[in-house]
Amino acid sequence: MARTAGSHSQITGPRVRAAALKLFSDQGFAAVSMRAIAQEVGVQVGALYNYTRDKQTLLFDLMQSHMDTLLRAFEDNPQAAADARLQHFVTFHIAFHHDRPDAVFIAYMELRNLTPDNFARIETLRRRYEDRLEAILRDGVAQGAFDIVDTKITTLAIIAMLTGVNTWFRPEGRLSLVDVQTQYWDMVRKLVS
């Protein structure tokens, strides 16, 4: 299928993704139509299909892109002390997610709208990220640095706690992002002590 005259795939494709990200985050996946995305981008509805097969594919691509970026961005040093690794995870997670509030909202709130196959693929990526934190916690237990009964539950609790920062933190608020990272690290440190 030919592109619409005057369109440029390197420009329009990212604009389609950006518009879908914003609209899905603001209104919810179910409430957004392909027509609304096209209107936001400034193209005809039919032109969207040059960039995505359907709305489900667009949602999956946004989630997969977010998870791939997250997995590539987090670097762990298994040779470092477990407490330093855990502190790095805490500060990284808060900063990374702070910079991507729409992607984070979609990644957590729109899972229910994925097809079973797409859900399984995203869950696999999420598990890979969780496994990195759990490896830090297991190593900390083995080193005697952490006192944790169940590393899996602790992993999920820490990620939920850290991701929650996105729901309330505002840069113009009384705390800086560094202040929040410092306080959350202190809470996580006490949780695993």
Image (cartoon, grey):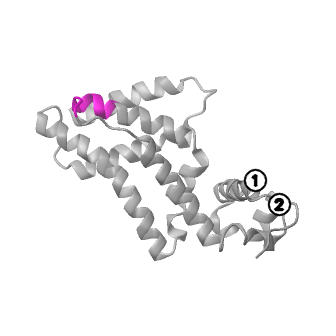
- Which stretch did the figure color magenta? 79-87
- The residue sitting at the right extreme is 5
Residue at the disc numbered 2: 7
Residue 4 is inside the magenta segment: no
Image position, residue 127 (x, y; %): 35, 57
Contact (Cβ within 8 Å) of mark 1 with mark 2: yes
Is 43 above or below relative to 84? below
Position of the N terminus by quadrant:
bottom right
Residue at (37, 62) in percent of width and height: 124
Asked if one can make out residue 177 in the rendered structure from this viewpoint, the answer is: yes
Which quarter of the figure has residue 142?
Answer: top left
Amino acid type, mark 1: Ile
Image position, residue 68 (x, y; %): 47, 53
Left or right of 147: which side holds 1? right
Kindly identify which numbered label has been placed on residue 78.
none
Image position, residue 33 (x, y; %): 73, 70
Left or right of 129: which side holds 19? right
Q: Nearer the viewer, residue 148 or 1?
A: 1
Amino acid type, mark 2: Ser
Q: Few, some or many C-alpha atoms within 10 Å of disc 1 (few <14, some 14-19, many ≥20)?
A: few
Helix, strand or loop: magenta stretch? helix
Kindly identify which numbered label has been placed on residue 11.
1
